[in-house]
Image: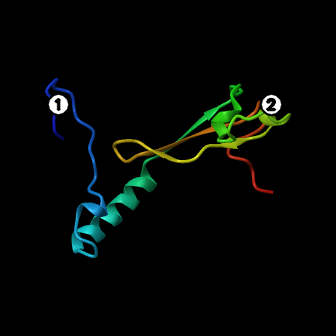
Amino acid sequence: MKRSTSGTALPRRIPRPWDFPPGSVESRAAARAMLEHAEAERVTIVSRIPEPAWELEGAEGEGPAPADWNNKIHVGEWNECPDGRLWRMVYVPPGMEWPPRSA
């Protein structure tokens, strides 16, 4: 791994398919590596702290929050870190389980 000028390790970046000509052996290999990396490096952060700002859900923040806002599980979208890892936030109200059990 490369080192920064401060001596700390720089984050590793896997090659992306668009770094190579379309359809090339390299772009296909990069696509496979990217999928393997994304599948192996997913982090879900579970919070039981109620969110006071309901606009975080992408609901525009117009008007009052729905009455059941902090009474149901909210699963955020996957976000990509600069090093290719994926993460998301999940809100789980007290008394509920994550992941939910199948019926």
For label 1, the SS is loop
The x, y position of residue 67, in whole percent, is 86, 34
Distance in Å between CA atoms under marks 1 and 2: 47 Å
Residue drawn 29% across the image and 62% down it:
18
| Residue marked by disc 1 | 4
Task: Look at the numbered disc 2 and give the secondary structure of its residue.
Answer: loop
Kindly identify which residue carries mark 2.
Answer: 64
Which residue is nearer to you in this view: 64 or 77?
Answer: 64
Residue, far left: 5
Identify the amino acid type marked 2.
Answer: Pro
Name the image quarter holding residue 51.
top right
Q: How many marks?
A: 2
Residues 92 and 65: in front is 65
Coordinates of residue 6 in the picture (x, y in percent)? 16, 23
- Left or right of 89: which side holds 67? right
In the displayed structure image, the side of residue 14 where residue 95 appears, left or right: right
Q: Is residue 48 above or below residue 12?
A: above
Query: Residue placed at 41% from the left, 46% from the top?
Result: 85
Q: Nearer the viewer, residue 38 or 81?
A: 81
